[in-house]
Amino acid sequence: MFKILKYSFFDLIRSRWSYVYLFFYLALGFVLLFLNNDLSKAVITLMNVIIILVPLIGTIFGVMYYYDSKEFTELLLAQPVKRASIFLGQYLGVAISLSLSLLIGLGLPFILYGLFQSSAIWDFVLLLVTGTFLTLIFTGLAFNIALYNENKIKGFSYAILLWLFMAVIYDGLFLMSLILLEEYPLDTFSIGATLFNPIDLSRILILLKLDISALLGYTGAVFQKFFGTGLGFLMALSALALWVALPLLNIYRKSRKKDF
Amino acid sequence: MIHIENLYKSFGKNKVLEGIDLSISEKGIFAILGPNGSGKTTLIKSILGMVIPDSGTISLNGNSIKNKWNYRNEIDYLPQIANFPSNLTVQELVKMIKDLRNLHGEDKQLIELFKLSPFLNKKLSNLSGGTKQKVNLVLTLMFDSPLIILDEPTTGLDPIALLHLKNLILQEKAKGKTILITSHIMSFVEEMADQIVFLLEGKVYFKGDIKTLLTQTNEPNFERAIANLLTEQNV
């Protein structure tokens, strides 16, 4: 698997898109810090960008890389290499190079602005950790979509729909159900519903860490009670880890049965 | 060497293999023939584990290949359509395949033979069809595995390269290897093959040497005998 990972990674490192992505984050980091001139405020603005943008990039890059490397995959399949390691290697190649772009692209400007002397350092670290989680999760979901769809156009459409659903539609449905069911106690329901969407989960994690959960109103208070404790925080992180593991398991399962 | 029993495979409603029984124990060159869509490539891909059969067993040297990958160390495979990662150069690709197989590979001689040196630093997407096929041949034949599978090896080759290919195949045969070839060029098959395996509608319709085929179909030459097999089915 590590050989495949190596080749996928170098292949991606040489591609123009990794640099576009890296420079975008570099520019974003510098501009935000220049405009805000305050690390903690920049972290809040960044959160809003990361939580929407990272999943989008992860999904698009994931499907794009899978379809683009079809020939490479076919070549590998005839070689003495385990099937699962071909796909997991390619997945890790994409996920790691995207995560590196994020970490370097945002890390560099913040370090230059004196992150290590700032009290916002842990907020920022949490932001990067959730960003990495979101990259891993959405690249994995994208690989799943691509494995199930031979047709490129279909695969791309499903991937975009998935992102749209998780980033926008889910919140709408969530809010509507809260309004419709307002007579009932909704603590458990809202916590449950949040666990089922990695984007929501990450947003809440960061907001709680930033201690602005008052902005979240009633549900915020519930989350504060639930997530605020060390246990709640740990549970949210494990939920994110599960979101990484499940798509990976399915890649492994599906790739064993697929014809090429 | 290869033993296939009752192999079935369908893609959706399209039944491709319908009970293939085939046993290849001898050394030598075996031509797998059949009309378009008769399942030649599916059969080969099943042996390689790229296609997962619906039912039936394939074993190589007595061991079932199901869910295994190590056995592919014993196989050199030439795919039908040379699809390569387009942003690699020829040299990088050769190096990568050698690295993946953990073998040295005799690529230098083959590169010289097919006059590929000027293309070594070119990207694969910029090569012509024939040159790609030559690269494909180098990648396949640079290793020394006991089983060689060639899917349409003659595609796009010029006469000199074709001559080199024939010599290479004969050399490998002389080393005591088993070689499976599919081709639509009948003169090529007639010249090279020791045994013919004829697939029709997902089954093995005929297996034997060319002489037996000629007497069985009562035709004066090989091309007509094959045509006879095809039309017989249509009547």
Image (tube, helix red, strand yellow):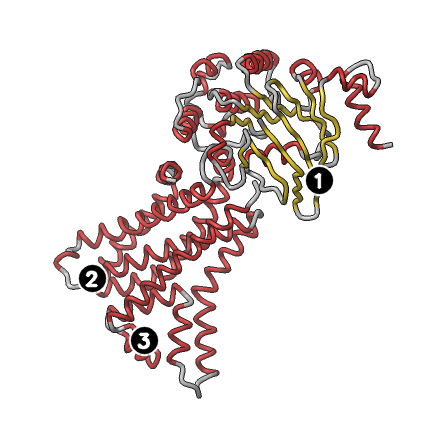
**Going by the picture, which residue comes out furthest to the left?**
A117
Q: Name the residue beneath numbered marker 2.
A: A122
- Identify which residue is drawn at 29% across, 54% down: A28
Have a look at marks 3 and 2 and say if they share a chain. Answer: yes
Q: Say left or right for A111 vs A83.
A: left
Residue A127 position in % (x across, y down): 28, 60
Query: At label 3, which amino acid type do we have?
Result: Phe
Mark 3 → mark 1, Cα distance in angstroms: 59 Å
Mark 1 → mark 2, Cα distance in angstroms: 63 Å
Q: Is residue B75 above or below residue A17?
A: above
Indicate the quadrant where residue A218 lies.
bottom left
Q: Say left or right for A248 vs B168.
A: left
Mark 3 → mark 2, Cα distance in angstroms: 20 Å
1 or 2: mark nearer the eye: 1
Query: At label 2, which amino acid type do we have?
Result: Trp
Q: The residue marked by circle 3 belongs to what chain?
A: A
Have a look at marks 3 and 1 and say if they share a chain. Answer: no
Have a look at marks 1 and 2 and say if they share a chain. Answer: no
**Going by the picture, which residue comes out furthest to the right?**
B235
Pointer 3 or 2: first along the chain: 2
Q: The residue marked by circle 2 belongs to what chain?
A: A
- Identify which residue is drawn at 37% across, 36% down: A3
Residue B232 position in % (x across, y down): 84, 28
Q: Name the residue beneath numbered marker 3.
A: A223
- Identify which residue is drawn at 34% across, 59% down: A50
Disc sitting over residue A83 in the figure: none
Question: Which secondary structure, mark 1?
Answer: strand
Between A158 and B143, the one nearer to me in the picture: B143
Q: Name the residue beneath numbered marker 1.
A: B18
